[in-house]
Image (cartoon, rainbow, N blue to C red):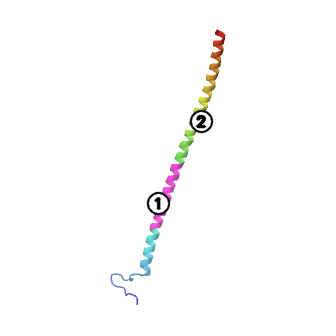
Amino acid sequence: MGALPSSDDPYGPSSDRTRLLAGTALLEDGSRGLMDSQRIALETEEQGADILRSLRGQREQIQNARDMLSRADTSIDRASGTLKKMIRRWI
């Protein structure tokens, strides 16, 4: 036979209300966990976007430096050729 409710627990030890409250608490905990996970995912996405922007800027700096070095190398080659011609004429 089922247990009779006492004055301390008028709904009984395993009442529908008790199970419903426990289920609601579990659902609220899960919802909070999902909201925290979503917040963390959004923060991570923002940080990733910041990192990508930073990397894009660094890539542009490297490309500009490489182009400048290439132009300098070309100028040095021309200057070297001019100096060699001057030396040959001088001798």
Q: Nearer the viewer, mark 2 or mark 1?
A: 2
* Whole-percent x, y for residue 26 in the image: 45, 70
Instruction: Tell me whether circle 2 and circle 1 mark residues in contact (CB < 8 Å).
Output: no
Left or right, residue 84 beside residue 52 = right
Q: Read off the magenta span.
A: 29-48
Is 35 part of what is drawn in magenta? yes
Q: Residues within 10 Å of mark 1 (few under 14, many from 20)?
A: few
| Residue at (66% x, 10% y) in the render | 89
Image quarter of residue 71: top right
Disc 2 is placed on an element classified as: helix
Residue flagged by tag 1: what amino acid is it? Asp
Compared with 44, 3 (above or below) is below
Compared with 71, 9 (above or below) is below
Image quarter of residue 24: bottom left
Left or right, residue 47 beside residue 6 = right
- Measured in 3D between alpha carbons, the distance from the residue under mark 2 to the one under mark 1, in whole angstroms, is 40 Å
Classify the position of the C terminus by image quarter.
top right
Q: Residue furthest left?
A: 8
Q: Which residue is mark 1?
A: 36
| Residue at (64% x, 21% y) in the render | 78
| Residue at (51% x, 56% y) in the render | 41
Classify the position of the N terminus by image quarter.
bottom left
Is 26 part of what is drawn in magenta? no
* Whole-percent x, y for residue 47 in the image: 50, 49
Compared with 33, 52 (above or below) is above
Residue flagged by tag 2: what amino acid is it? Gln
Q: Which mark is residue 63?
A: 2
**Callout count:** 2
* Whole-percent x, y for residue 81 in the image: 65, 19
